[in-house]
Image (cartoon, rainbow, N blue to C red):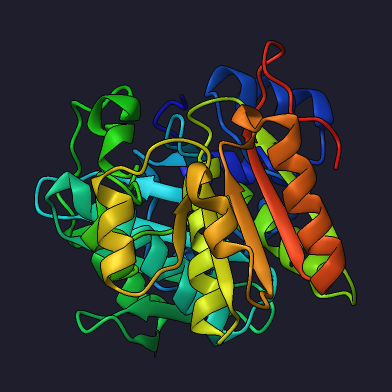
């Protein structure tokens, strides 16, 4: 949680270079802002002030707000009666990255059933960008951003931003929201994206490779595992997804669109052809002889294998 903050005051405090004062201010206001972002915020305030923003326009922002359980963070977020306002801070970035971030922000904020103006400010060169109504990125002036700030009717009743967000609205499941998942109508959290990048980097090497995707229940491992499978087949890799239990209706739907999904009981039927990737879902339920069979196949054909498992002390997957 963070408190509503005047970003001009925040910028002035951080510009003092007095660490104790800054820490006291950010702690009291429950502000989450990194060192680099402090410099970016100062540059932003200077540009907006030169374009006509005054002290009252700087009121009411949630700084570094993060949606609970999801991990999605927004640099500057202000809620309004007519529309919400989101401004992202960048030291340096390219347009593709900015577009991706603002598109992701739009996805998460659309759940509030209120239009949102999305901007990004890059302190290097100091350009402003806006996500337009067609989902495209356009370069805009500081005056355009100030207009969006001053024309917003700020909601004064929002004390805790957590009250506006329901984490379950964003938990797209390959099983319970199969159509959305197949259409790509979801976004991985920053942490999931980082794990995905590490896993794909590990799998890019030559020869047989084993990767363990482990974590507590409800941390988004299943979506990440199935997203990696989706990534593989979209890149023309031959992949197999093994579920260590009975298949559900979501699995059946995935099979109908061409996914190679096997219940563990049918393992022998699928471990015949050459494969590039095997993902073992709920691998903590594997029996030793099943684990050995998968291991032997992976080593034989030289493919990649991901074991997706719940981190449960009572059900640990043996090392392959």
Left or right: 192, with 234 as reference point: right
How many numbered tags mark residues here? 0
Residue 211, horizontal then vertical, whole percent:
78, 51
Q: Quadrant of residue 237?
A: bottom right
Tell which residue pokes out farthest to the right in this image. 206
Viewer can see residue 127: no
Residue 315 percent location from the top left of the image: 67, 18
Q: Is residue 163 left or right of residue 313?
A: left
| Rendered view: 248 above or below 152 | above
Residue 74, compared with residue 217, is above or below; it is below
Query: In the rendered view, does 68 fall on the left or right side of 242?
Result: left
* Quadrant position of residue 143: bottom left
The residue located at (30%, 22%) in the rendering is: 159
Q: Residue at x 74, y 41 (%)?
A: 291
Indicate the position of residue 106 as horizontal and vertical percent values: 31, 62
Is 310 drawn above or below residue 269 in the view shown?
Answer: above
Q: Give the quadrant of the C terminus.
A: top right
Residue positioned 41% across, 73% down in the render: 51
Q: Nearer the viewer, residue 317 or 1?
A: 317
Is 172 placed above or below 319 here?
A: below
Taking the spot 20% from the left edge, 48% from the top edge, the residue there is 111
User: Residue 139: in sight, yes or no?
Assistant: yes
**Left or right of 296, for residue 79:** left
- Residue extending furthest top? 314
Q: Looking at the image, which is closer to me, 84 or 260?
A: 260
What percent of the width, then of the height, locates residue 63? 49, 41
- Given residues 60 and 92, the one toward you in this image is 92
């Amino acid at each position: 949680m963070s408190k509503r903050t005047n970003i001009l005051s925040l910028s002035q405090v951080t510009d003092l270079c007095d660490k104790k004062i800054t820490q006291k201010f950010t702690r009291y206001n429950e502000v989450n802002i990194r060192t680099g972002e402090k410099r970016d915020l100062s540059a932003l305030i200077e540009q907006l002030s030169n374009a006509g923003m005054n002290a009252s326009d700087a009121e009411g922002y949630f700084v570094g707000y993060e949606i609970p359980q999801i991990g999605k963070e927004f640099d500057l977020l202000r809620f309004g009666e007519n529309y919400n306002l989101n401004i992202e801070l960048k030291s340096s970035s390219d347009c593709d990255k900015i577009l991706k971030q603002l598109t992701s922000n739009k996805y998460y904020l659309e759940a509030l059933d209120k239009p949102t103006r999305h901007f990004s400010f890059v302190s290097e060169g100091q350009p402003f960008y806006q996500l337009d109504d067609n989902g495209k990125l356009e370069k805009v002036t500081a005056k355009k951003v100030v207009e969006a700030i001053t024309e917003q009717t700020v909601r004064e009743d929002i004390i805790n931003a957590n009250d506006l967000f329901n984490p379950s609205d964003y938990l797209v499941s390959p099983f319970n929201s199969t159509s959305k998942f197949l259409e790509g109508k979801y976004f991985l959290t920053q942490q999931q994206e980082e794990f995905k990048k590490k896993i794909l980097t590990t799998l890019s090497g030559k020869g047989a490779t084993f990767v363990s995707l482990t974590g507590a229940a409800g941390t988004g491992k299943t979506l990440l595992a199935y997203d990696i499978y989706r990534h593989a087949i979209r890149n023309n890799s031959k992949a197999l997804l093994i579920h260590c239990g009975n298949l559900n209706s979501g699995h059946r739907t995935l099979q109908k669109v061409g996914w190679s999904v096997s219940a563990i009981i049918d393992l022998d039927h699928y471990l015949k052809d050459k494969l590039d990737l095997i993902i073992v879902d709920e691998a903590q339920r594997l029996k030793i002889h099943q684990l050995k069979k998968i291991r032997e196949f992976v080593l034989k054909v030289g493919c990649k294998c991901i074991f997706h498992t719940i981190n449960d002390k009572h059900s640990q997957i043996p090392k392959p």
